[in-house]
Image: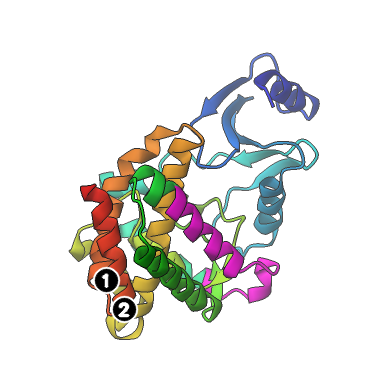
Amino acid sequence: MNKESIVNKLENVGYYTEDSKLQKLSGDASSREYYRLNHENNTYVVCVEISNGQQSCDFNTVTNNILSDIKTPKILFYDPEFSILILEDIGSISLKDFYLSSGLSKHVEAVGDIKKYQNMPLEFCMGRDFDREKIGFEFDLACNYFLQQHLGVELNNDESLLLKEVREYIINYYESHKEVVCHRDYHSNNLYVKDGVLFHIDYQDMRVGPKMYDLVSLVDDCYINFSDAEKEKLLLSYDNDFYNKYKNDYHIVQIQRTFKALGSFAYLNIDKKKDNYLQFIPVNLEKLINTCKTSTIEKFNDFAKILERGLND
């Protein structure tokens, strides 16, 4: 939808006059577009998707039903046919921005909020989980766009067989760990701080999955490179006995999610011409290789060798 059409729609619902201003914001990795609306001495965020867009519909449904102690932007208007949402403006200070200026305190709070999702009934996800189809798709996308196209790795027969084993191992892990409600994209660019309050966004694709999923998303954030001491503080804030209880599970989810993220970054560059995500590949590839190397699971050790070969080819 072009800007003129958006303005016309806003006028029709009483959110635009000749004194109003609509400014486009930088978007996320999705097809949605965001604008900041200045109207009658107030500011709002306008989210636009293709007509009858599923993500806008899901965002509206989840926001209206989410627990009250998880802070989300209020929905002031929603038109499902045109997929326009007018939202409370929660500012422009992401959790990443807050961390860079003020440290780790809000990240500790964000770790605590993970448990609020995990206490929700599984039915809240409306039947969505990290199933074979979802995890398999993410793994295949990463193999195609990141491993083969971005790194230029040509797999021999033994390596192709190994990747199938890694893929199957990860899928089976997720199939057997449908434990809790997961935000699914719980990182520093999807959490905002306004007036000291931590707000959550982009939760519309919640799924049932492993207990470690959102913790991995936050602590092994693809957009922040925490020190070891900072990571330890966050992990122990989740559970004082974290390393005895969850270390192995954390590493399996970390490997899956980091490989998935690398695939997404390569896909966005190759197919969508969004090269701003390339800057996040080197540090996350290094992280993935190191995690695979130190894994107690042999097939992950061998997976690290394929990834390293991509660096050397």
Q: In terms of secondary structure, where does tag 2 sit?
A: loop
Q: How many marks?
A: 2
Where residue 180 sits: x, y (%)? 55, 75
Residue picked out by circle 1: 301
Q: Is residue 194 visible?
A: no
For image coordinates 68% across by 46% down, the residue present is 56
User: Amino acid type of disc 1?
Assistant: Asn
Seen in the image, is 19 located left or right of residue 199?
right
Point out residue 90 in the picture as x, y percentages from the top left corner: 51, 42
Q: Measure how far apart labels 1 and 2 are at the Cα level.
A: 7 Å
Q: Which residues are magenta?
A: 117-144
Check if residue 104 falls in the magenta segment.
no
Up/down of 23 relative to 308, above or below: above
Identify the image's colour scheme: rainbow, by chain, secondary structure or one colour. Answer: rainbow
Which image quarter holds the N terminus? Answer: top right
Left/right placement of residue 96 relative to residue 27 reads left
Q: Nearer the viewer, residue 266 or 279?
A: 266
Q: Quadrant of residue 94?
A: top left
| Secondary structure beneath label 1 | helix
Give the x, y percent position of residue 158. 35, 67
Q: Residue at x 63, y 19 (%)?
A: 20
Determine the main secondary structure of the stretch shown in magenta. Answer: helix
Q: Residue at x 45, y 37 (%)?
A: 270
Can you give x and y, in whole percent of width and height, for residue 207 in the image?
59, 66
* Disc 1 crowd, CA 10 A, few/some/many (<14, 14-19, 20+): some
Q: Is residue 187 left or right of residue 291?
A: right
Q: Amino acid at mark 2?
A: Ile
Tell me whether circle 1 and circle 2 mark residues in contact (CB < 8 Å): yes
The residue identified by callout 2 is 297
In the image, 215 versus 63, the foreground residue is 215
User: Neighbour class for label 2 at 10 Å: few (<14), some, many (≥20)?
Assistant: few
